[in-house]
Amino acid sequence: MPNFKTGVISEIAESLDGLECVTVKVDEQTRDAINYSSVTGGVKVGDRVVINTTAVDLDLATGGQDFVLWNLERETHSSSSGGHIMKVRYTPYQLDVMAAEAPESVSHNTLAPAVSLDGMPVVACGLHSQIAPAAAMLKLADPDVRIAYLMTDAGCLPMAQSNLVRKMKEKGLIDATVTCGHAFGGDYESVNVFSGLATACEVAAADITIAAMGPGATGTSTALGHSAMEQGQIISAAGALGGRPVATLRVSFADDRPRHRGLSQQTITALRYGAVARCTMAVPDLPVMELTEVMDALIGTGLTEMHDVKIVDSWETTVALEKFGMESVTTMGRSISEDLRFFEAAGAAGMFAGQLLYQTDQ
């Protein structure tokens, strides 16, 4: 059950579009918190607020922050979108959005008959941190390629929480964002992954869509109990709609956890049990011993029978990230130099998706 505390805003450290980073004094203790100003309204120093402290109290790494629930200085707050689709439905925090496919949306007539992606490549990721190297490699090869980021609801729900996406938009690596399911705050809102992909294709006019959860991931040290399973569902949706799904492999030789060393077990289960459509697994052209370990895992788990394999030279991933000012990107707290293969694997997926875009024989 959630934990709530009441405190006073003592500092506003940063104010961004839709998000404020604040310090709250609770009794004699100070706590850092996030206020989603687009949902609860803005705050100022001295305001009494109610915060949710559950994740910090549980010492969680993922989502381990306090969040402002309500500003007690304000009796009412209204920020209607004009739409009727509710996200975070049937909870005290539900909010209305203007879903692109809703009847009241200007895009409704475009999306009403949309059931095909017309061959659009879709890069399906298992972690939020994979989107930067995938997009950087795409833009390195073709600066004019139009990329949409489809953020699902398997991780963080508010788009405003992602500093990575904010920076990628500033650098021109993402041209449009779509939030689907209960995720919210994208340039376009959508009801599910299928309509989110259609929105990216038909409304955002994307050449390629990169689909991944927002920041944060959930795991339970079980075969199926992790948020990365949605990677298979993204692949299935893209394939069913006539897109060309490309799987980003989670590869690491720096992670100390056996289940994530080499080819992550989460990638294996997502592609084996979650992906009912055939995809291409982009494998970075690694040094021989590392490449052998990854390929042995793909072959030994039967994934090479279910999906296609493409070995991609992605050594330029570091170059691409540096070119677009994304050299500080991390995954699980590790930098590019500390976990190079992880980023090269994601870069390989982006590179191959770009190659697919210009193939005329598909």
Image (cartoon, rainbow, N blue to C red):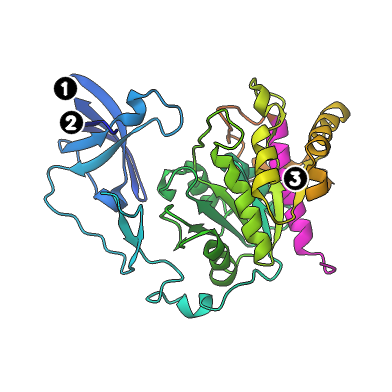
- State yes or no: residue 357 in magenta: yes
What amino acid type is highlighted by mark number 2?
Answer: Gly
Residue position for label 2: 7
Q: Residue at x 62, y 59 (%)?
A: 237
In the rendered image, residue 167, in percent from the top left (x then y), is placed at 51, 46
Alpha carbon of mark 3 to alpha carbon of mark 1: how far?
51 Å
Alpha carbon of mark 2 to alpha carbon of mark 3: how far?
47 Å
What amino acid type is highlighted by mark number 3?
Answer: Ala
Residue position for label 3: 348
Where disc 3 sits, the SS reads helix
In the rendered image, residue 106, in percent from the top left (x then y), is placed at 43, 77
In the rendered image, residue 196, in percent from the top left (x then y), is placed at 53, 62
Q: Earlier in the sequence, mark 2 or mark 3?
A: 2
Q: Residue at x 40, y 48 (%)?
A: 158
Q: Which residues are magenta?
A: 340-362
User: Image height check: is 274 above or below 4?
Assistant: below
Q: Would residue 232 be visible to someone looking at this image?
A: yes
Find residue 100 and report its image quarter.
bottom left
Where disc 2 sits, the SS reads strand
Q: Earlier in the sequence, mark 1 or mark 2?
A: 2
